[in-house]
Image: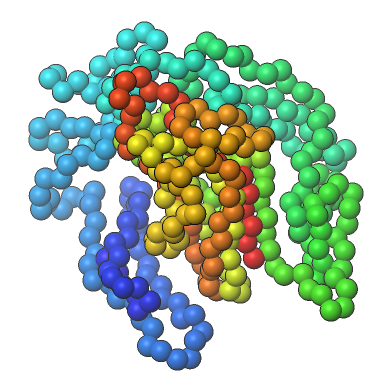
Amino acid sequence: RFYVSSQLSWVWAYIDVPEGWAEIVFVYLRDGAVAGEDRALIGEVGWEGTSLADTSCSACPIGKQSVAGSDRCSSCEDGQVFHVPTGQCKACAPNHYALPGMTTCLPRPVCTGVDYAAVFGECKASGKRDKHFEWLDPRVCEGGINLPPAHADVTCAPCEPGQYRQGAQCLNCPPGHYGHGSVDEPCEICAAGNHAPLERHISKFEQQLPDGFTTGCVGSCGSEGWRGHGMFLDSGAHHVAPAASWLQFSVHMKYPGALRFLFSLSCDEKLAMLNVSVDGHHEPLTIDCRNTTSHHVSGTPPPPDGHHSEKTWHHVPLSRGTHTIRWTYYRHSNPESGHRPASPWPHLPNFHHP
């Protein structure tokens, strides 16, 4: 539990620690201001998972179970759910599935376009690369569509704005230069009376997340966090309440600036919500699951349920230093019918920050 002078209250911070010896270091960084009495306080430190005696019994996290006398909680393997009367994991019936953490076996949904993604090979010096399609892991669907055929020697994706291509590589423009990321188009120098601000643009999201991004999911998750679909990210599919699928991005600001991201929502406020936080503080969005429209976004899959909002830019001012931005999709309820359609999801098609 910690407190800094710019905050109004104490804040809890949680850190995942792997097995073995670990060294935790707290570093206070002064932002350079000469006025004020900035400081950080640590009010409480605690940890669990050691040989020390417990102080109380704690409820298992969502999606995990235990039997009497347990010192830890666990979840069943794929295709199994916890059977309370016997205290053992029980296999699902045919044509049903359960992912680790789920408490109920569910019918396998029919495969659609949200269940696979394009996979690209390395860009070659010729500016070409190979493309094929793979089912997203974990695959819970069956039947429906088949994977599209593979393609050889498709054009490499353009570099991001602020970069230029050199053979198979995308390189950043040197300071004072700018570029649009086009093939065979070198960066140009800014003329006198102009400047090229230090910026980074991200608009392509393949299965491997860009540098600085991490993801995960807690609860009854249908996928292992957020997924890249080429031109956008989504929060995953087939989540069952309760579930929280998160995407985190860390950025170091050399100068004060801002982060902008383009997003849209396909959700029902009775079932789900999207939360955005900056350095642990909630960031209100201009649209949410209560005020989305039925307009469909061109170039993205049709919404699986609920309504789909128009793409909207959101602007977050950032001070100099390192910041953590976190997007969390919460599935808090399931349809009353008990038959769960594909999860509604947010899309994040574009990022931009100095």
Residue 241: horizontal and vertical position, in percent? 32, 33
- The image shows residue 323 at horizontal and vertical percentages of 49, 64
Image quadrant in which you'd find residue 129? top right
- For the N terminus, which image quadrant? bottom left
Residue 49 visible in this rendered orientation of the protein: yes
Q: How many marks?
A: 0
Residue sitting at x 25%, y 34%? 64
Viewed as shown, does residue 315 lie left or right of 273? right
Residue 280 drawn above or below residue 182: below
- Residue occupying the point 84% across, 79% down: 193
Identity of the residue drawn at 52% across and 58% down: 250
Nearest to the observer: residue 293 or residue 202: 293
In this view of the protein, can residue 136 be seen by the observer? no
Residue shown at the point (70%, 68%) measured from the top left: 198
| Image position of 272 with respect to 252: above or below | above
Looking at the image, residue 66 sits to the left or right of residue 242; the answer is: left
Quadrant showing the C terminus: bottom right
Q: Is residue 203 left or right of residue 304?
A: right
